[in-house]
Image: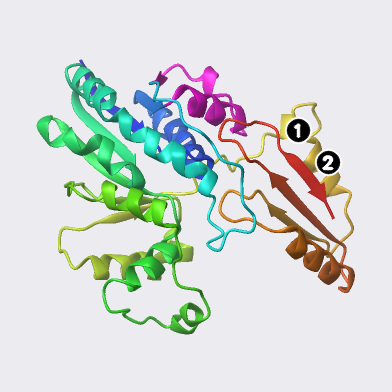
Amino acid sequence: MEEVNVLMVPLPAQGHLNPLLHLSRLISSHNIPVHFVSTPAHTRQAKTRIHGWDPLSISNIHFHEFPVPSYETPPADPYSSTRYPTQLIPAFFASIHLREPIFSLMKQLSNTTRRLVVIYDSLMAYVIQDIGEIPNAESFVFQSVSAFAAYFYLREYVGKPEVSESKIFQTLPERNYPAEFEEYIRIQFEKPISSSGDLFNSCRAIEGKFLDGVAKMKESSSYKNWAIGPFNPVVINKKELNSEKRHCCLDWLDKQPPNSVIFVSFGSTTAVSDEQIREIAIGHKNTEFSVYSLHLSISKVDQNQGRVRIL
């Protein structure tokens, strides 16, 4: 019987799949079996888009693919009033159907380990709500946003306590999600789940003040959070610096002149209209710097190739 097994439950979106797959690598390096759960399409997406290591080369990361009902993925709308990637929302609602297979997997794993640790995305609470029925299981919540963002969102609900950076918040827009996503959030928090704390892909040296601020706003003496980032590999393998494995964009970056500015937008958290792109291009032209702006357009959930525009 294993001492510990870890079950990863990410939200089916790139910015949520990627960090939990990186975290899976870190945990598995301590000889702890990790079980990564998602749909077949999103598991394939996570594996394909990972950088710095090969998920198939690590024997104690196990992928579990569970199908969900088919759904339509609308095209991305750069002119939406909320600027939220609404094309992802159907996949979120489809993931609700993972509740039963994930509960079955939790029961199966709990019989083979003394301790089952479930790390779930904060927006996947619905599918692991039955964890209380498994006596040797405990859960941790992965917060996919920064501690700064978590603090900013919580301010809206608890009277907006102030920190020394309060002036920053005054310049930020209020949260503006489409009604469909607000409904999805509501479903996730219908049934409270007793977790052991929150995990952030961050570090205290950068966000310690906001991590402490989040803890204060929780108003619970038992609440804990941990900054355990960065999840992605940060050690450069010198053997690969001049090898064919090195991505061509890194060679291109090395050739750019000093004081160049690189702006990369992948469109997963916001959308930029053609008019805005033209304005950005005009601004770039009027600066004294070499500016390169990359925008990747991805309109389908399981689309591995997008349209790249270089200004």
Q: Residue at x 30, y 56 (%)?
A: 225
Q: Tell me: residue 134, above or below residue 205.
A: above
Q: Secondary structure at mark 1?
A: loop
Earlier-in-chain disc, 2 versus 1: 1
Image coordinates of residue 164 in percent, x first then y, are 42, 83
Q: Which residues are magenta?
A: 39-65
Q: Quadrant of the N terminus?
A: top left
Which amino acid lies under the numbered mark 1 shown in the image of this protein? Arg
Q: Is residue 53 magenta?
A: yes
Q: Residue at x 71, y 45 (%)?
A: 296
Q: Is residue 164 above or below residue 228?
A: below
Percent coordinates x, y for residue 182 in the rendering? 36, 55
- Left of 97 or right of it: where is 165? right
- Please state if 59 lies on the left or on the right of 141 as rendered: right
Residues tagged 2 and 1 counted as in contact (Cβ below 8 A): yes
Q: Give the CA separation, mark 2 to mark 1.
A: 8 Å
Camera-side residue of 89 and 128: 89
Badge number at residue 251? 2
Q: Quadrant of the C terminus?
A: bottom right
